[in-house]
Image: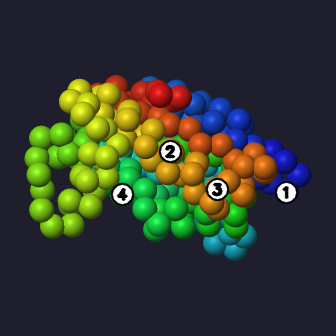
């Protein structure tokens, strides 16, 4: 940790990897959700050590996956972990106002949004999500490779955003990861 309580990107990534290792053998949650922690974060605010952009899929629960508790992670969830101005604004807030140094784009295998982009032509508002994923994956037809390409696409959007570039000099790091539904393992640096 630094003097002001901000966790470096490297330390945050280490904490996420250690938390995922605990999760792989856990039968109950490991994060601190105690009354003491709730009271502390209410009185003193949040100090998350990582920003997680994750899919809205109900099987993907970042706080559980990383054995994190209240106030540990700044989680942004949207189907297909796609990025638009709303998500970028949330990332900018967490990086600029909360001092978070690590941004993780967390995709997952067996993603319904990726499947919809690969095999369907949905209508309505879902099209905004699948069109973004189609742009990310191009001609790729393998679902896992498409998931990885979609994560990298969201990472590129974050890295290209003006606000994020301003933060790079302060140690901000963007990494991609894929969560595997069957065994719970997170693969980083995809």
Give the residue at mark 3: 164
Give the residue at mark 2: 155
Mark 1–mark 2 Cα distance, whole angstroms, equals 27 Å
Q: Which badge, 4 or 2, comes first in the chain's sequence?
A: 4
User: Which mark is drawn over residue 4?
Assistant: 1
Look at 24% across and 52% down and name the residue there. 130
Look at 43% across and 43% down and name the residue there. 153
Q: Secondary structure at mark 4?
A: loop
Mark 4–mark 1 Cα distance, whole angstroms, equals 31 Å
Q: Counting other residues with Cα less than 10 Å from the Cα at mark 3, is it few (<14), some (14-19), or many (20 or more)?
A: many
Residue 67 visible? The answer is: no
Mark 4–mark 2 Cα distance, whole angstroms, equals 14 Å
Residue 133 horizontal side relative to residue 159, left or right:
left
Give the residue at mark 4: 78
Mark 1 against mark 3, which lies toward the viewer?
3
Quick one: which residue is furthest to the right in this view? 3
Image color mode = rainbow
Which residue is more in the foreground, 25 or 145? 145
Q: Secondary structure at mark 1?
A: loop
């Amino acid at each position: 940790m630094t003097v002001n309580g901000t966790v470096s990107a490297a330390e945050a990534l280490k904490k996420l990897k250690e938390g995922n290792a605990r999760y792989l053998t856990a039968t109950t949650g490991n994060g601190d959700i105690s009354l003491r922690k709730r009271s502390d974060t209410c009185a003193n605010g949040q100090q998350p050590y990582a920003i997680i952009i994750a899919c809205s899929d109900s099987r993907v629960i970042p706080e559980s996956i990383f054995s994190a508790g209240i106030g540990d992670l700044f989680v942004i969830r949207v189907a297909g972990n796609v990025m638009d101005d709303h998500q970028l604004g949330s990332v900018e807030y967490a990086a600029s106002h909360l001092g978070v140094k690590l941004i993780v784009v967390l995709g997952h295998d067996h993603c319904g949004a990726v499947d919809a982009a690969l095999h369907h032509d949905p209508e309505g508002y879902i099209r905004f999500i699948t069109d973004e994923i189609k742009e990310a994956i191009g001609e790729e037809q393998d679902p896992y490779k498409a998931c990885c390409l979609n994560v990298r696409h969201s990472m590129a959007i974050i890295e290209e955003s003006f606000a994020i570039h301003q933060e790079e000099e302060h140690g901000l790091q963007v990494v991609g990861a894929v969560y595997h539904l069957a065994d719970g393992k997170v693969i980083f640096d995809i």
